[in-house]
Image: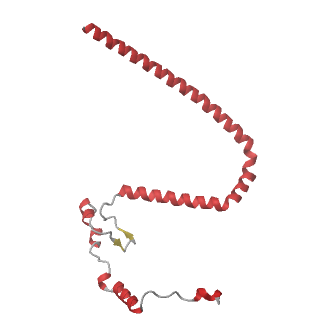
Amino acid sequence: NDDMEFLIPPKQSETPFEIRQRIRRVLSPDSQPKMAFLSQLQQPETDDSRASAVAPVFDPNTGLWSPNTPNYDDKKAERVSRFLFVFIFTVLFAVFVAVFHEEIMRFLQKNVAPFGPQLKQYSETMWTSLNVQFEWLKHAITTWINQLVQLLQQASSAAESAVIDDE
């Protein structure tokens, strides 16, 4: 008996009359969306036409909502759509990795392990190259700062001598 309990329908909180009234309201001609805004879709888009729209407009030809909404910003819409695309892709990738992490690790250990010594040598070469470039950059910046300090000292001494000459 307890196993069959899920087959019992839930108790209704609305009477049949209330349900019929809701269905009539939804199906009545007054509740249908007005098509007056479709004329705005054929007009060229201007700031005035966007500002005159009071509600988003559904275009049945494309199945999309119109950009003729108040305060619609193309750049913001593009930014939001890119963010959503990246976010969804990231979540899907994270789920993929979480589900198949054991298989991924087995594949990497089997196929990438033979390249280990070569990768180690490559990384050591890269670090050595980066250290040499860093030392060169540090020397160039130090030289530039020293030259700047000398120029500032010369300008300062020239300004002091000009003030002394004027007195």
Q: Could you say where residue 13 lies in the image, as x and y percent from the top left?
A: 45, 86
Q: Is residue 80 left or right of residue 106?
A: left
Q: Is residue 154 left or right of residue 8?
A: left
Quarter where residue 133 is shown: top right
Quarter where residue 92 is shown: bottom right
The correct choice, above or below, for 26 with respect to 95 in the image is: below
The correct choice, above or below, for 12 with respect to 123 in the image is: below
- How many tags in the picture? 0
Tell me which colouring the rendered structure shows. secondary structure
* Farthest-out residue, front: 2
Q: Could you say where residue 147 lies in the image, as x and y percent from the top left?
A: 45, 18
Q: Residue at x 65, y 90 (%)?
A: 1
Q: Could you say where residue 165 lies in the image, as x and y percent from the top left?
A: 27, 7
Q: Which residue is drawn at 40% across and 15% down?
A: 153
The correct choice, above or below, for 37 with respect to 156 in the image is: below
Nearer the observer, 15 or 144 = 15
Q: Which residue is drawn at 38% across and 14% down?
A: 154
**If the image is split into quadrants, where does the C terminus sit?**
top left
Nearer the observer, 18 or 67 = 18
Q: Is residue 143 left or right of residue 34?
A: right
Q: In this view, does 89 lie to the left or right of 118?
A: left
* Farthest-out residue, bottom: 17
Q: Could you say where residue 35 lies in the image, as x and y percent from the top left?
A: 29, 76
